[in-house]
Image (spheres, rainbow, N blue to C red):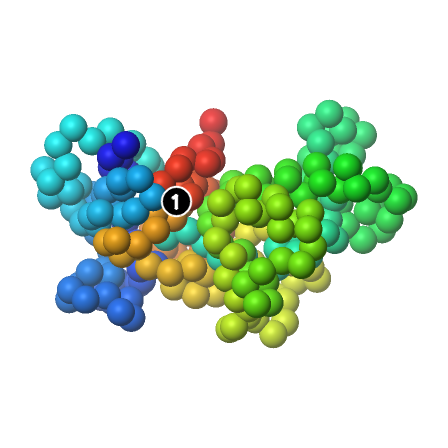
Amino acid sequence: MLTIHAAPLVLPAGAAPGMDAPGMDAPGMGAPVVDGAVAVDGDRVIAVGPYDEVAEDAPGARVRRWPGVLTPGLRQWHPLWLLRQCYHPDPREADELGEQPLWGERLAALGDLTEARWSGSVRRGVQRMLRYGTTAVASPGARFRDPVVATAVARSGLTVVGTAGAPGMLLGERPDLDPFAEGYDLPGTVHGPLTVGGRADLAVFDVPDEAALRERGAATCVATVLAGRLVYRAR
């Protein structure tokens, strides 16, 4: 189905004002678009630009209007750690374990987890990543050797990319579900620009601009679109 995602501010390349993304053909194509929109047909982006222009070229399209800033999807550098060194509690365990991922001593206190319990945790961890606008995860060789992780990631539709350019050290004591925790700006945190003909991976954050997004982080995510599918929407 042809869908238009509209937002007060669209950052097609995750670029600061006046900066175009490498490889974008048209001058200014990577620049922020006020009252912008992205048209998606199937799993592909077919237009990026001002809403009025995009809507005129896509009559009959379903329109989803979002608050805040629309950007390309984000890249998570540490998926294996977050999925295999953290336990993501089942909602039915919330009274006992809380809702946040458990790691370190709290994870050790759970004892030996069955493979079934680990599988459930990994699936929930993947869903948590989607809530932070993540559409790509990094792994050496662009593949996961852990079969539980590989299966969960493949079923989710997340893009698996290599680790070239990965940060050499963490800013905090452990990896974070928020890709902005690495300290990079938006161009350094997105997987790639939104380009016509490219895969429709995008995220929306309820903030007014890029500066506020970097300050408040990806916890402000209100929607994640993966290969054209709306896979997360904040309630």
Q: Position of residue 167 (x, y in %)?
A: 57, 71
Quadrant of the image containing the N terminus: top left
Q: Quadrant of residue 27?
A: bottom left
Q: Position of residue 127 (x, y in %)?
A: 57, 39
Residue denoted by label 1: 227
Residue count near mark 1 (Cα–Cα under 10 Å), binned few <14, some 14–19, many ≥20: many
Q: Is residue 23 above or below residue 143?
A: below
Q: In front: 66, or 116?
A: 116
Q: Is residue 60 above or below residue 132?
A: above
Q: For the image shown, how many numbered marks are present on the structure? A: 1
* Left or right of residue 150: residue 179: left
Q: In front: 149, or 31?
A: 149
**Residue at 68 percent of width and 51 percent of height:** 147
Please indicate, yes or no, whether residue 63 appears anywhere in the rendered image: no
* Left or right of residue 70: residue 141: right
**Residue at 90 percent of width and 44 percent of height:** 111
Please indicate, yes or no, whether residue 123 appears anywhere in the rendered image: yes
Q: Position of residue 201 (x, y in %)?
A: 38, 48
* Left or right of residue 186: residue 119: right
* Left or right of residue 58: residue 184: right
